[in-house]
Amino acid sequence: MWPFEFDGPMLMTLHDLTHVHYPQTQPADRLAEIARCVEPALERARVILTDSQFVADELQRHYGVARERLKVAPLGYAQRFHPRPLADLGRVTAPLGVTPGAYLLCVGTLEPRKNLALALRAYALLPEAVRRRYPLLIAGMAGWRRDDFAAELQAALASGQVRLLGYLDDERLAELLAGARMLLFPSLYEGFGLPVLEAMASGVPVLLSPSSALPEVAGTAGTYVEAGDPEGWCRAILRLIEDQAEWQARRVAGLEQAQGFSWKRCAGITAAAYRQALEH
C-alpha cells in the first residue's frame, strides 16, 4: 500500500510487482491507480517494507530504490495451521464427500495469475483411477478474468472429480488444508505465497512453480515444476501419491522450513522499520 498524503515521515509496504511483470492479469483501473501512485510513493517513503527478499531485489532493479531504504519482513502463519490427526477431520471432509488424506487442494483467488488452469490440465492427465481416489478441491473466491479459464473449470467440475468450494473461513480452511494429500500452487508470480507456508506448517507437502518469491518460502522442502508444464505436474502429483517415502520426506522438510517464519518475527521487523522512519 502507498502512503496517504500528509507532511510527516512515511513508510510504505509493497507486496509485489505484479503490475510490472504480469499487467495482463490486473484490471485496467487497478493498473491506472498503481501507475499514478507507486513511483511518487516510493520516492517519498523513508522506508519500504516487502514480504520477501525477492521483491526487495526487484525494487532495486526496476525502480532503483536504495538497499538501505528496504526492509524485508517475511510473513508468518497462524497457530491454527498445524498437523492434525486425520481421524479428527472427518466432520470437515464428510460433507464434501472426500476422505482425509485422500484429496488434492488448490488455494487462491480464481484469477489468471494463480494459474489454476495449469492445475486443472495436470489433474486431467492423471489416470482415471487416481482421480477417483483423489478428488481435487479448489478453495478461493472468484477473482478478475475468471472467464479466461471458465470452460476448463466447468468441464472439470462436470466430471465430479473436481469440486469448487468458494471462500472458506479461516478455521475451516486450516482444517481442510491439514487433511490434504498435497497443496497444488502453480502461481505465475507471488510476492510471498502465504498458502505455501500454511501448508508446510500443517504438515502438507507442496507442489509449486519455481517462480518469483516461492522458492524463498518453500526452500528445499517444495517440489518444483515449471508453471507451463502440465505433464511435469502430473508426474510430480503421481510421485507424491505413490511414493510414501518421498511424501513423508517432503512433509518433514516442510515442517522444518515453516519454523523459520513467524508473525512475531514479522512484527519485530515491521516495528523496527517504523522506528527507522521516525528517526530520519
Image (cartoon, rainbow, N blue to C red):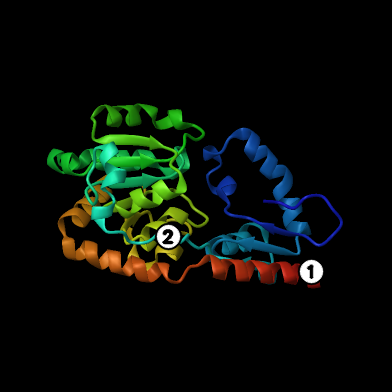
For the point 56% across and 38% down, which residue is it?
26
Quarter the C terminus occupies: bottom right
> Residue furthest toward the left?
129
Asked if residue 139 is positioned above or below residue 256 in the image, the reply reads above
> Residue furthest toward the right?
7
Answer with the quarter of the image where residue 157 lies: top left
- Say if residue 280 shows up in the picture: no
Crowd tier of the residue under label 1, counting other residues whose Cα lies within 10 Å: few below 14, some 14–19, many 20 or above:
some
For the point 32% across and 69% down, which residue is it?
253
The residue pinned by badge 2 equals 197
Q: Amino acid at mark 1?
A: Leu
| Mark positioned earlier in the residue sequence (1 or 2) | 2
Where does the image place residue 2, in percent across and percent down from the top left? Answer: 71, 51
- Say if residue 50 shows up in the picture: yes
Q: CA distance from mark 1 to mark 2?
A: 32 Å
Answer with the quarter of the image where residue 133 lies: top left
Where does the image place residue 36, in percent across and percent down from the top left? Answer: 73, 43
For the point 55% across and 48% down, which residue is it?
18
- Which mark is drawn over residue 278? 1
Crowd tier of the residue under label 2, counting other residues whose Cα lies within 10 Å: few below 14, some 14–19, many 20 or above:
many
Where does the image place residue 144, in percent across and percent down from the top left? Answer: 51, 34
Where does the image place residue 40, in percent across and percent down from the top left? Answer: 76, 52
Q: Is residue 73 left or right of residue 88?
A: right
For the point 39% across and 52% down, which residue is it?
174
